[in-house]
Image: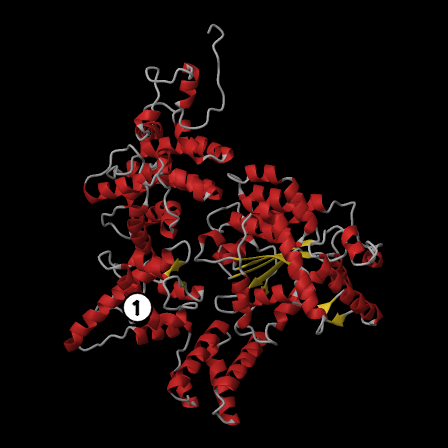
Amino acid sequence: MNPTLTKERFRRLFRAYLLESESVAAEKGLEPYHFSKLFKKEHKVSERIRNPGMCIQMAKVYISRYATFLASPSKTFLVEEVARPVITEAEQKDLELARAEARPLTEFLCAFNITDEQEDLMSKYLKGTRAAVVGAFEEWLQNKGSQFFWLCAPAGMGKSVAMALLCERFPEEVLAVHFCRHDIEERRGPKQILRSLAHDLALRLGPYREELLRSRKDLKGGMADATVNHIWDQLIVKPLRRAFPTNQPPPSRPIVLLVDALDESKYQDDPKGLLYILRRNLKLLPNWVRFAVSSRPEVKIMEELKAYKPVRIQCDEKQNRDDIRLFVEDKLGRIGSHLSEEERRRASEVLCTKISGMFLYAARVLGQLDHDQLSGAFKVSDLDDLPANLDEYYEQTFSKAFPFQSKKEEAKENEERLARLHSLHSLLEVVVAGQREFTLAELAELAMPVSATPGNKIEEAFGLLEPLSGLLRRFERRPQCKVRFNHKSVRDWLTDFEERSDPLLGPDRSVSQRYFISESKGHETLAGRLRHLLPRDSGVAEEEGEEGKKGKKDARRSRGAACKGTKPAPDDGLFDYAIQHCGFHALQNLKRRGKGQDHSEGQEEIIIMQYFTSLRVYEEHLVKFPHRTTGLISLLSEAETAAEAQASSGHPLVIKHAELHQFHRWAMACLPEALRQNEPLCIYPLALGFPDTFAPSRIARQTMRAWLSRVPPKYQLTIANKPSGLSPLLLQLKGHISYVLSAAFSPDG
């Protein structure tokens, strides 16, 4: 929290805790609205007090402190002792009330908890560094002619730490924050980014929150199939303009929406996505609303945002070198206490030369020295053996964890190590291809051999990953520990290779190539394992053998089987992941094969048909991920395009283009309607509106017949066995599977 308390900030906090209830005030012997008189000219009491007793005590402290505040010639004062915890508690209470009011907005907004992530980034910050970035940001805030701040730097330069620092230094200006993550699909999409910013803004900006609440029903219905530009217009631009019309004074400070790691978002997938908005539509915002982003200097980003001048962090610039030196000297003061002043100075010079201005490499190398202290104090001469750059550091880390012998007589030992390395590759390939973080238990289930027991899988997976724990974030021996790289550069290094047959060790391969992995193989592994978790449609003929048995077991878990009293499918993390992403992984692997990287026969086509032609998959998707319906339809469109390409190239038609085309037409018409009615099961009767020859109609009819066959005979009423009090008309209405929304009567009876 900012240690200084300005006049406006004090008034806002005080206003949140004014007495508003006459009955409570009377009990305490106080006049109603007594404290509000201090702010009568500037503010109107608008928030109801939830804990009056606490508020009275806090208000007394505020009155005393406010008198000191007004007497201060500088118009600011440091929040000390009593005032600091009081204001912290006030802010927390304010935020809790805002969250309670904004809870209905989560139906169409995205709420990501990134507090731990920001705290982790700030733990890496050293006081006194990145003063140039803070100064440039502060100068930009004072410049009313610019709405866009862009921090641009190569990988490993500390952009995320700098952005977290700006959030902490300017809490009154930076009201909405989103940190993109390359390994979490939900945090990369441009639609999710805008919804996340809108959610943060609603928590911090009362008039904006009230405006969203007023138009909640319209916004909820229009977000299902909305484009990025529509979301920008309906969630950000128009609500802000309505909340602060031009005939009213704007907020006293600029409001900043901050997005970190724009290069890790899906900016390549949408030509009219976030980059287009930043380039063309930023001017639609009120001039007191600003946008701040950070990114790597990637070609497309530089081209799209060329109209803006970025704040750059260069390895060789003086300010960055000074920051690195300050960082190195601070770390050496902790781990080099055994060195003399002269040795420490020489060590600092050697390290600063090797580091070459890259903060990530500095943290890695100094962390390695700190770890080596356990086996003995390092010497200055040892610094010459440190890796020369980040790539060499990663290679050295893998070489220590999985070494190889070069002598031919040790080929057997190499063969055993190669087998371990192959298992490690399977784990890491699943990590880089995954669309979210996997727990250690999930990773072991997806990547380790099927024959092993769950306990052995977890232990073996931990044993393989534990030597690389320095490259993983908070890795522990727990089944629920989430496995992720501590920086995107690790992933980039592992997948940085040209076309090659096999990333494993060969006689002519360099040391680093032994450890390279293929993201495509990760997609293949995930698609193959996840397909067994997919549900099957009830009443549809199953495959023979083990696949058929599993399909029947999954079919019994059908939500539609609730007609006979069975329980729905369990809330399983991998089951949910399969529903959302199995088709995506199969399509990604099919694209890789289409580019000629691998001509081997695979199961991708079969998995694509299994995923996209199952009504149960669509039903579960609507239940669990209604906000991702548009993405599912887009994915189905990609599958249809892939099938069309196969048909035109003469490839054996494992993917049936005509069938996928039928499902695409059905999905475009029925999924938005099911979403509008908030009734996933209505996709079955809606499918009956299509011709009988359509695959969705045929499957829906078979499924609904299967449901009816499970109804006990005593409840199967017909004209022959109906109770005397049940008319034929009511009998017809009772025979429907879903709701009867309307009934038509013939005029002639």
Left or right, 526 with respect to 185, comes to left
Residue 745 lies left or right of residue 394; in this view the side is right
Residue 435: image location, x then y, percent: 41, 53
Residue 562 can be seen in this image:
yes
Picture quarter containing residue 434? bottom left
Extreme residue in the left direction: 409
- Locate residue 143: give its quadrant: bottom right
Q: Secondary structure at mark 1?
A: helix
Residue count near mark 1 (Cα–Cα under 10 Å), binned few <14, some 14–19, many ≥20: some
Q: Is residue 108 above or below residue 308?
A: above
Q: Position of residue 3 (x, y in %)?
A: 69, 70
Residue under the point 23% across and 40% down? 548
Number of numbered discs visible in the structure rendering: 1
Image position of 487 with respect to 229: above or below: below
In the foreground, 720 or 371: 720
Question: Residue 179, position in %: x, y?
Answer: 53, 59
| Placement of 367 over or under 582, stated as above or below | below
- Residue 651 in the image: x percent, y percent? 25, 39
Q: Is residue 541 above or below residue 343?
A: above
Colour scheme employed for the rendering of this structure: secondary structure
Q: Circle 1 is placed at which residue position? A: 464
Please indicate whether residue 14 sits to the left or right of residue 182 in the image: right
The quadrant of the rendering that contains the N terminus is bottom right
653 lies left or right of 257: left
Name the residue nearer the viewer: 111 or 659.
111
- The amino acid on which the numbered mark 1 sits, given as a three-letter code, is Leu
Q: Nearer the viewer, residue 48 or 12?
A: 48
